Amino acid sequence: MRVLSGIQPTGRPHWGNYFGAIRQYIDLQDEQESYYFVANLHALTTVRDPKLLAEYTLDAAIDLLALGLDPARATLFVQSDVPEVSELCWLLMTGAPMGLLERCHAYKDKKAKGLPADAGLFNYPVLMAADILAYDADTVPVGDDQLQHIEVCRDLAASFNHQFGEVFVMPKAKILDASAKVPGIDGEKMSKSYNNTLEIFDDPKAQRKKIMRITTDSRPMDQPKEPAGDHLFQLYSLVATSDQREAMGALYRRGGFGYGEVKKALADAAERYFAEPRSRRAELASQPARVREILADGAERGRKKASQVLARAKEACGLII
Ligand code: ADP
Ligand code: TRP
C-alpha cells in the first residue's frame, strides 16, 4: 500500500485545511508508506509572482513539518524536483481525450464565466494523474473537490494500460472525512475565498482578536442552547480536550452563559492546541537550509521511484529503441 497526496502552496494554512485535510494525511504516515509533495507546478497555473511562489513553496513544506509530518517516516518533496513527472505528463497527454478534460470543473467553470483559460489549467488533471501514477500510489487522500481528478487519473491509466500493457497501478481516492467541515468566523464554511479564516500560525494575540470577532446569534444569556449546530461550539470542539468539550456542552444546555466566555475559552484552547506546532514552525523557519535538505532527500527518494515507473511507461509505448 502506498499513499500519496499533493498540497498546493497557496498561502498560510487555516483551521479548515488542517482539520479537513492536513491532519488526516499526516495520520496516514503511521499506517502506510507515504509520499507528500508541495504541488508548485500546479500552483504555477495561478501564482505568477516568482518570489511569492518560491516563498509559498518553502512555507508549505515548513507548515507540514511543523504540523507533524515526519521525514523519517514519510517522503516529503517539491513536485518540480521530480522532473520525471512532467515527462510522464506528456505521455499521458498524448492519449487524453479533449472531451474528458473539457468536462473538468476548474476549466469548465472558468470557461462558463467567459474567462480566458490557459493550457496549463486545461491539462491540470493530466499533471495530477502523472503525480499519482509516477509513484505507483494506490491510495490518494483528497477532499471531495478533487474526486473528479482522481476519476480522470483512473481513466487515463486504464486506457494507457489497455493500449500498452499493465504499466500503471490503478489508484483509489480516499475521501477525507466530510464531517470534518470546519466553519469560519462567520459560520459559513471556512475558506480563503470567504475571508473568514482562522490561521493556524497566527500569533496568539492576533488569533484571540479574530476569535473575539466570531459572529453569534442574539440568544439571551439565560437561555439554554443545543451545542451541536453552533459554530462557536464546533470550533471549540476541534481544539478542546474531550472533558472540556463535554463541560462546554453541558454549559450550553444549561444556559446562563454569554458567548464572550465561550470565545475566551476557545482562544485559550486554541493557543494551547497549536503551541507545539507554532514553536516547531519558528524553529524550522530559522533553519531553511535544514528544510531544503529534507526536501532534497525526499526528492531523491521520489525520483528513484518515479524514474522506474517512467522507464516502464517509455518502454511500453515504444520510446526506448
Ligand atoms: P480554501 O477554500 O481556503 O481555498 P483549499 O481549497 O486550498 O482552501 O483547501 C485545501 C484542502 O483543505 C481542501 O482539499 C479541503 O479538503 C480542505 N479544506 C479547506 N477548507 C476546509 C473546511 N472549511 N473544512 C474542511 N476542510 C477544508
Ligand atoms: N489538485 C490538488 C489540490 O488542489 C493538489 C494535487 C496536485 C494533488 N497533485 C496531486 C492531490 C496528486 C493528490 C494527488 O488540492
Image (cartoon, rainbow, N blue to C red):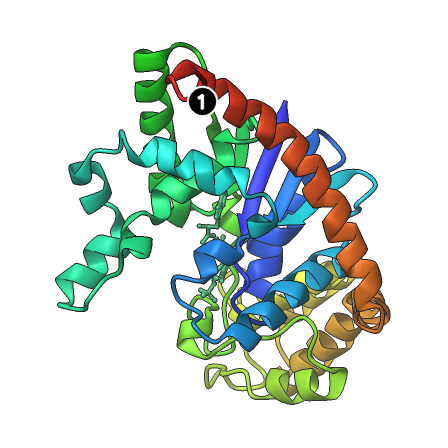
Q: Check disc 1 and report its element: helix, strand or loop.
A: helix
Q: Residue at x 72, y 79 (%)?
A: 267
Q: For mark 1, what is the residue?
A: 314
Vertical placement of residue 146 versus 173, above or below: below
Q: Nearer the viewer, residue 105 or 23?
A: 105
- Corner quadrant of residue 290: bottom right
Residue 227's x, y, as percent? 56, 64
Q: Residue at x 16, y 67 (%)?
A: 113
Q: How many marks?
A: 1
Vertical placement of residue 147 versus 222, above or below: above
Local crowd at mark 1 within 10 Å, few (<14), some, or many (≥20)?
Answer: some
Vertical placement of residue 188 versus 309, above or below: below
- Corner quadrant of residue 89: top left
Q: Nearer the viewer, residue 310 or 227?
A: 310
Residue 38's x, y, as percent? 59, 54
Residue farthest front in this picture: 321
Residue 80's x, y, as percent? 56, 51
Q: Nearer the viewer, residue 308 or 188?
A: 308
Q: Is residue 67 visible?
A: yes
Instruction: Say what amino acid the circle numbered 1 marks.
Output: Lys
